[in-house]
Amino acid sequence: MDNLFINLGESIRNGLSGMFSPGITDILMSVIHIVAILVFILLNVLWLVLLERKLGGYFQQRPGPNRTGPWGLLQTLADVTKLIAKEDIIPKNADRWVFRAAGVCVFIPALMVYAIVPFDKGMSAVDLNLGIFYFLAIASTSTVAFLMAGWSSNNKYSLVGGMRSVAQMVSYEIPLVFSLLGVVMLTGSLNMTDIVARQEANTWNIFVQPLAFLIYFVAATAELNRGPFDLPEGEQELVAGLYTEISGARFAVFFLAEYTNLLAVSAIAATLFLGGYLAPFGWTFLPGYVWLILKIYLMVFLFMWVRWTYPRVRIDHLMAFGWKFLIPVSLANILVTGIGIKVFESYFK
Amino acid sequence: MKSLFGEGLLKGLKITFSHLFSKKVTQYYPEEMPKLSPRAHSNFALDADKCISCGLCKNACPNRVIDLASVKDENNKRVLTNYEMDIQYCLFCGFCVEVCPTNALKFSQDFETAVWFKDDVKLHMYQIDPSTVKTIAKEESGNV
């Protein structure tokens, strides 16, 4: 049970290598990895959308969706069916191809992040040495996609929403990177597996880098455009922001990308700060990938809890908070971490 | 200084977390009917046995919604034979309920007044055939 998926992967690889040359086997294995990740994402998103609405309801003393199926379990299915059945509308003067491409361009980076997540020991699709760097590089490209959606709609609200999302995501990327830097300094590696291994040898990073975790959490909320930082779609001033002209199946893709991103960011947080696939208190009765999923869902719960608690902040407050508070604090965290490492090395080793 | 450390933020999180497990306030309307307050102005209910056909409700109505008919029985008492309300003109002011001397007309717990066809709007609250009521005149003619 512990190595279910690893053994499965090995047996598939052995079977394929009997039939094809090593090069083709590698390509086929990559395809299988992508399909497996896609299935994982789709299943989770199907459930996450309902979870978001259910939790949102519960946080406001409502029952949430409860009509479609038992406990509203078929709600997402009904919503997706409705969205797909809708007419595909492209505004008259929209930049057609950019408009069409935007949804895919938001989704692809979110999908690519999963390549480096170690779901269990030796169970990441690609074990990159520059894992975190890859994550940051890939995640930052989705900013362009949001601007594409905003610009191509040919709508003032969409454009302002897109511009806001760029301003917000670029600003909050800096504290996000700095918060991860603390973890990287402790480990001395950008490899996700190495970081988990270090947490296995010492303690979880959240206990040595609590401030970094907080900064990461806040910055990630802003990166995800989630409440209370969901200004790109602020209804009170922008109709629906960059989603104003997006409807039907295209909106479903954006929705999918949003939750894929949420899951990815949670997975990174769980791996870097909460010990990844490691079992807490030595409770190894559950396999590593189950622990990772539990930790991911803990992070998702935190994101949802925050979203359904706080009102939307004002855009200038958001920018001021990012530049005048989070960045200095994250820089200070790096300084303190550096001093701490030096002190520890010179006195305790 | 307090707000700098996010005390209010934590307080907010605490409140929503307690809501997560608290009883939900939502009414599951079609399955569970809400209990209307005693003074709610809802649909009308007529207790025809109590009605003395005095016509006060008819006179009290500002929109002439109510129409009633009656005959006198063998004891020379009025017996209600027909009671109708053109509910589409009703403004639910409640004067008719207020004025009723025997509390025959009341507001009920029913508030679903929507109907599918226009003709169904009229509320037929009580209707009997007037010829079934024993009247003095009838008895006299029977004796002859």
Image (spheres, rainbow, N blue to C red):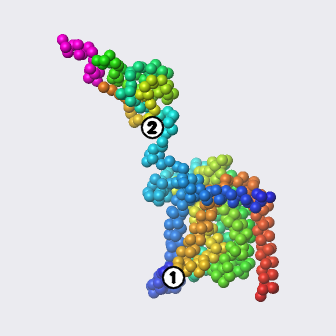
Q: Nearer the viewer, mark 1 or mark 2?
A: 2
Q: Amino acid at mark 2?
A: Gln
Describe the element under mark 1 as helix, strand or loop.
loop
Q: Is residue A273 magenta?
A: no
- Provide the residue span drawn in magenta: B129-144
Residue A269 location (% of width, % of height): 64, 71
Residue at 27%, 15% (x, y): give it.
Answer: B136
Point out which mark residue A3 bears.
Answer: 1
Query: In 3D space, how far apart are the residues under numbered discs 1 and 2 (Cα atoms)?
Result: 63 Å
- Is residue B139 visible in the rendered image? The answer is yes
Residue A271 location (% of width, % of height): 63, 74
Describe the element under mark 2 as helix, strand or loop.
loop
Point out which mark residue B20 bears.
Answer: none
Can you name the residue that lies furthest to the top here? B144
Residue A224 location (% of width, % of height): 64, 62
Residue at 59%, 56% (x, y): give it.
Answer: B19
Please name the residue that numbered disc 2 is placed on: B109
Residue at 63%, 76% (x, y): give it.
Answer: A275
